[in-house]
Image (cartoon, rainbow, N blue to C red):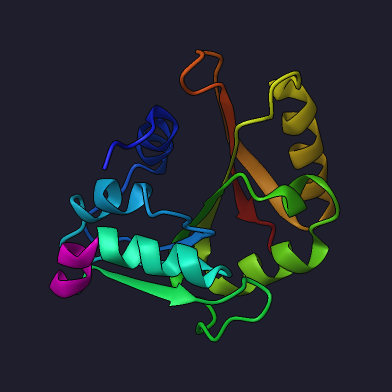
Amino acid sequence: MAIPKRYRWAVEILDVQPDDLILEIGCGYGHSIPLICEKLTTGHLTAIDRSEKMVSDASAANRQFIGSGRITVLHQDLLDNHLPASTFDKVFLFNINAFWMDPREELDMIRRLLKPAGRFYLLHQPPPGHDLEEFENAFQKNLGRYGFSLVEIFKDQGEAVRSVALVATPTPQ
């Protein structure tokens, strides 16, 4: 399976540590799974997607990592999941449109799932004709409005990636 460059870029930003507990929201075909799992030893990746077909495809493409116990792929929606609270060191997603609209419920759920010192990685590749800044500004506004503090912003303007990533932590309440 050829892995698009934007997923390699995203996993670099995640800075996966061997013992990380990571949640990927909307795993799609599972492009990031091998990149993350090859860096985990005692850590674990949980990948969720609301599409049964995507879960099936991601599972089939990554059987070796499922067999090793480094990943669980689940057919679940973020807002209707059965994951325990305060579990994950890192939560990330790539191209989930709800986050530039009004993601109050989604960000509340991410806050619930993250450990107190956890980090949320919001990555997006805008459609053709849209600027990275348009999405960066919307994401930054929504994160601040719904209880997250911005840690860092990454941008890649190159044609193969052309994406923005915002890293945030839950603001103590």
Direction from residue 142 to residue 80 in the image, left or right = left
The residue lying toward the viewer, choosing from 163 and 167, is 163
Q: Decide: is 11 above or below 69.
A: above
Q: Quadrant of residue 103?
A: bottom right
Question: Which x, y percent locates residue 140?
Answer: 75, 38
Residue 129 versus residue 141 in the image, above or below: above
| Camera-nearest residue between 56 and 71 | 56
Q: Main secondary structure of the magenta part?
A: helix
Of residues 151 and 109, the one drawn nearer to the viewer in this rendering: 109
Q: Is residue 92 above or below residue 56?
A: above
Residue shown at 57% from the left, 27% from the top:
163
The reply to whether residue 84 is in sight is yes
Q: Which residue is pictured at 56% across the width and 73% down the height?
A: 113
Q: Is residue 44 visible?
A: no
Residue found at the far front of this picture: 53
Question: What residue lies at 48% left-to-right and 67% top-to-bottom?
Answer: 53
Locate residue 97, reporting x and y percent. 72, 48
Looking at the image, how many numbered discs can be counted on the residues?
0
* Residue occupying image coordinates x 56% and y 21%: 162
Q: Quadrant of the C terminus?
A: bottom right
Q: Is 37 inside the magenta-drawn segment?
A: no
Q: Dividing the image into 4 quarters, which one contains the N terminus?
A: top left
Q: Is residue 26 left or right of residue 60?
A: right
Residues shaded magenta:
62-68
Does the magenta portion include 65? yes
- In the image: residue 128, left or right of residue 57: right
Residue 123: percent from left, percent from top? 57, 40
In the picture provided, is 36 more to the left or to the right than 112?
left
Query: Based on the displayed image, in which of its 4 quarters is residue 107 positioned?
Result: bottom right
